[in-house]
Image (cartoon, helix red, strand yellow):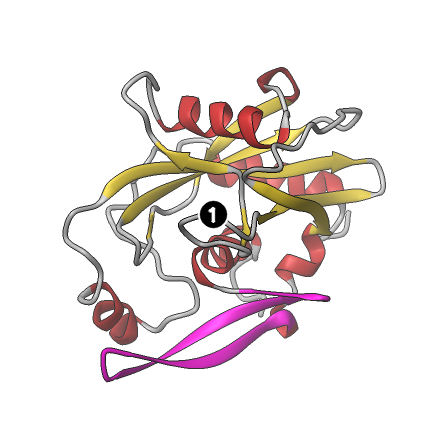
């Protein structure tokens, strides 16, 4: 069986995420940065961190696994127009990160929990707007019809998971923050170049699924 086949990828997802817990890796992830640059970047982050969660929806298409992404509405207060996963802050009524991710997904794109198998968690992410985000990975059964909340989401699209895993699509980009030069990696999935937290989550997913010794 090919390492990139849908069944092999599903098996690897389940195996690698089986024992994961929110924040269990005891580190904050900055996708694409070296260890030295990660520390420099984290030193620039706000100290007050609002807990949040996103769903990373992996769609179990017969022709191959895809990742569902959204483009945020252009008039939102934070991160307007950016490529994102459905999600938001963890509210007092949410029992945990999973509940928050599922609630936000239902509210934003109308995808119900009955079609989502929760597989586990990727490394928490820090966002410069002050959030600490827990990515919740879910395997989604096809056959759904999305209902988009246009006040939050401008559009949605799917990209092949194999494209997310392709290192040729992980492009370096130099950024200067507060006088510090850092080299990030963007994920180029034409016509989109995905950066920031969403890009970092995709790179975390790629690291998770790439077998040792495979570049």
Report the residue at 54% width, 39% height from top.
Answer: 152
- Residues packed near mark 1 inside 10 Å, few (<14), some (14 to 19) or many (20 plus): few
Q: Quadrant of residue 21?
A: top left
Dot 1 corresponds to which residue?
76
Query: Looking at the rendering, in which quadrant would you find the C terminus?
Result: bottom right
Q: Nearer the viewer, residue 13 or 172?
A: 172
208 is higher (above) or lower (below) than 60:
below
Percent of width and height locating residue 144? 75, 24
Residue 101 point in image, percent of width and height: 46, 30
Q: Main secondary structure of the magenta part?
A: strand
Q: Residue at x 49, y 54 (%)?
A: 80
Q: Is residue 159 left or right of residue 193?
A: right
Q: Quadrant of residue 162?
A: bottom right
Q: Nearer the viewer, residue 122 or 108?
A: 108
| The residue stretch that appears in magenta | 169-194
Which residue is rendered at x = 56% and y = 32% of the image? 108
Does residue 161 show up magenta in the picture? Answer: no
148 relative to 198, above or below: above
Residue 67 percent location from the top left of the image: 65, 45
């Amino acid at each position: 069986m090919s390492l990139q086949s849908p069944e092999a990828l599903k098996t690897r997802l389940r195996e690698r995420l089986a024992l994961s817990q929110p924040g269990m890796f005891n580190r904050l992830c900055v996708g694409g940065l070296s260890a030295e640059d990660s520390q420099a970047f984290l030193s620039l982050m706000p100290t007050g961190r609002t807990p949040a969660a996103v769903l990373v929806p992996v769609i179990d298409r017969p022709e191959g696994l895809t990742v569902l992404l959204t483009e945020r509405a252009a008039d939102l207060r934070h991160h307007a127009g950016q490529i994102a996963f459905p999600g938001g802050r963890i509210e007092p009524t949410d029992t945990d990160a999973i509940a928050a991710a599922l609630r936000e997904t239902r509210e934003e794109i109308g995808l119900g929990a009955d079609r989502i198998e929760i597989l586990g968690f990727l490394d928490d992410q820090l966002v410069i707007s002050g959030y600490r985000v827990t990515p919740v990975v879910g395997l989604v059964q096809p056959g759904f019809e999305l209902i988009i909340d246009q006040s939050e989401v401008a559009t949605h699209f799917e990209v092949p998971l194999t494209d997310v895993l392709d290192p040729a699509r992980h492009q370096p980009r130099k950024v200067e923050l507060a006088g510090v030069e850092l080299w990030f990696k963007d994920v180029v999935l034409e016509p989109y170049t995905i950066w920031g937290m969403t890009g970092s989550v995709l790179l975390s997913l790629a690291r998770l699924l790439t077998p040792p010794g495979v570049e």
